[in-house]
Image (cartoon, helix red, strand yellow):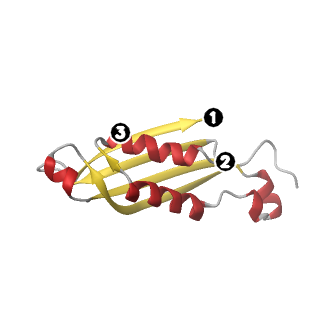
Amino acid sequence: MKALGSTTARIQIKNLRLRTYIGINEEEIRNRQDVVINLVLEYLADQVTHSESIEHAVNYRTLTKAVIRHVERNRFGLLERLAQEVLDVLMNHPQVSLAQVEIDKPHALRFADSVSVTLCAMR
């Protein structure tokens, strides 16, 4: 039986916990801090769902490793900048048609569990 239309796959990577330099005050610049990253990726998956062909799938492990490498090797002043750079890493993959990045900075505010920024891009 042939499906009508295109099939979109959605991959969600939840609560990726990393440490990086994030912030603008002296203590934040000197010391790594925790960030929690949630990612959503979408791509057209017709070839994968009909054939189980791994070469047509988005390799989420490879993309996650690229995100980890980028976050841990760089310094960021603002959550927005960090989120944009992670979004760029994801959107550099030609198969990704939509990506969403949410980055939480735990304990950034007194009386709050975290502060987060979410960015989304599509082609």
Amino acid carrying label 2: it is: Tyr
Which residue carries the number 3 mark?
A: 80
Q: Secondary structure at mark 1?
A: loop
Which residue is nearer to you in this view: 49 or 94?
94
Q: Secondary structure at mark 2?
A: strand
Which residue is nearer to you in this view: 90 or 99?
90
Spot occupied by residue 14 in the image (x, y as percentages of width and height): 44, 60
Amino acid carrying label 3: it is: Glu
User: What residue do we see at 64% from left, 61% from top?
Assistant: 59
Task: Left or right? Give the position of 46 relative to 108.
Answer: right
Spot occupied by residue 52 in the image (x, y as percentages of width and height): 78, 65
Spot occupied by residue 57 in the image (x, y as percentages of width and height): 71, 58
Which residue is nearer to you in this view: 57 or 76?
76
User: What residue do we see at 49% from left, 38% from top?
Assistant: 120
Q: CA distance from mark 1 to mark 2?
A: 10 Å
User: What residue do we see at 52% from left, 60% from top?
Assistant: 64
Q: Earlier in the sequence, mark 3 or mark 1?
A: 3
Which residue carries the number 2 mark?
A: 43
Task: Left or right? Give the position of 57 relative to 81.
Answer: right
Q: CA distance from mark 3 to mark 1?
A: 20 Å
